[in-house]
Image: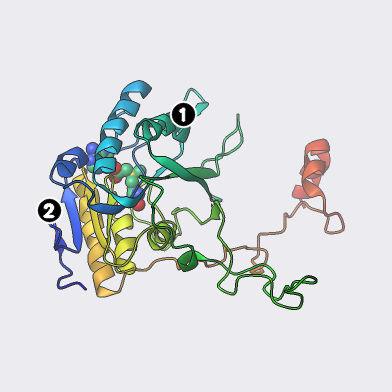
Amino acid sequence: MFDNSKIANRFHPSERLVVFPGDCLEFLKSIPDETFQLVVTSPPYNLGKEYEQRIDLEAYVEQQRCVIRECVRTLKLTGSICWEVGNYVENGAIIPLDAMLFPVFAELHLRCRNRIVWHFEHGLHCTRRFSGRYESILWFTKTDGYLFDLDSVRVPQKYPGKKHFKGPKAGEYSCNPLGKNPGDVWIIPNVKSNHVEKTEHPCQFPVELIERLVLALSREGDWVFDPFLGTGTSVIAAYRHRRRGAGVEIQERYVAIAQERLNRTLEGTLRVRPMNRQVFDPRNAGRALTTAPWSDPTDGNVEPRLLERRAKYKAKCRK
Ligand SMILES: C[S@@+](CC[C@H](N)C(=O)[O-])C[C@H]1O[C@@H](n2cnc3c(N)ncnc32)[C@H](O)[C@@H]1O
């Protein structure tokens, strides 16, 4: 299917991998209508991170509108667009960016198929609100004739041995032997300090998050496009499943990281966390440090007591 596996720096339909160093709107100008089967991205959140300048929220939404409009133009009629975002935060108050951006997609007559909640365990510890432990992926399609290959992403059933107990199918297995629909809440570790995929980029996608979208929403040989490529994750996920991948990144140092990770993908040496691996649980793994030294082993309900009887907690800690 593919004659070459080099990394091109501009788009041509015969390429397999494209990393364009520059601005996504500039790149999108060169793309014909209805080229990409899947557009998947995580844009800057306007938080003033090292790769973005904080601007007025309305101006931010307008910038996003320009990119989204171009992505929709370049999307195939069977295609999908997945926009992954978290919260905009100002003076400790949050504004969920998916709520801000939803009307932009609606104006363009896209149909929302899911608001996928991506839950993870690690992040900042807040003191004046609950710590943020999810972001969302808004999944839209251009038409009702969209591609959705559910079988390629099914996950194991909870009770695969369950049978119909009455009716004409009594005694037959009641669940789909290919597995169940993964649902719209995805529990996938985020890329923090000791994740095998971690680079110096502060906001990297885990490859497995994008792999599920690539498998369900595109076919082998299709184009997957990420306008805010960062470290190359979306293109890596596309390549791993025999899709074509194109992405744009404006910061030179992230372009270099994306190219380096893609080269290692081509050689087969890039380490990634496998899809559907169980989330690590230190208690099940029998790790030390999982039992609080101040707890009473005969009392399972330790934390409320900590709050109620601070003096006792201090005394036990000194032991
Ligand atoms: C949230 S990060 C994406 C990280 C990516 N998902 C990954 O796995 O590494 C957003 C990226 O968009 C890039 N960016 C910002 N404005 C851009 C623009 N106009 N064109 C292309 N890339 C841009 C930033 O430098 C940043 O790396």
Determine the CA span between mark 2 and mark 1. 35 Å
- Precedes in sequence: disc 2 or disc 1: 2
The image shows residue 228, relative to residue 283, as above or below, that is: above
Where in the figure is residue 187, as x and y percent of width and height? Answer: 55, 55
The 10 Å Cα crowd at callout 1, few under 14, some 14 to 19, many 20 or more, is some
| Classed neighbour count for the residue bearing mark 2: other residues with Cα under 10 Å, few (<14), some (14–19), many (≥20) | some
Amino acid under disc 2: Arg
Q: Is mark 1 within 8 Å of ligand 1?
A: no
Q: Residue furthest right?
A: 298
Could you tell whether 27 is left or right of 125 in the image? left
Tell me the element at label 1. Answer: strand
Quadrant where the image shows the N terminus = bottom left
Type of amino acid under label 1: Val
Read off the residue under disc 1: 89
Whether residue 54 is visible: no
Residue 253 locus on image (x, y percent): 22, 49
To which residue does mark 2 refer? 10
Q: Nearer the viewer, mark 2 or mark 1?
A: 2
Q: Quadrant of residue 177?
A: bottom right
Image vertical order of residue 242 relative to residue 308, above or below: below
Identify which residue is drawn at 26% across, 66% down.
Answer: 221
Q: Quadrant of residue 282?
A: bottom right
Q: Which quarter of the rendered image does ligand 1 occupy?
A: top left
Front residue of 102 and 96? 102
Question: In the rendering, at what x and y percent does residue 294 appear?
Answer: 77, 51
Residue nearer the viewer, 40 or 152? 152
Q: From where the camera sits, is residue 196 visible?
A: yes
The residue closer to the viewer here, 305 or 242, is 242
Residue at point 65%, 64% (across, down): 288
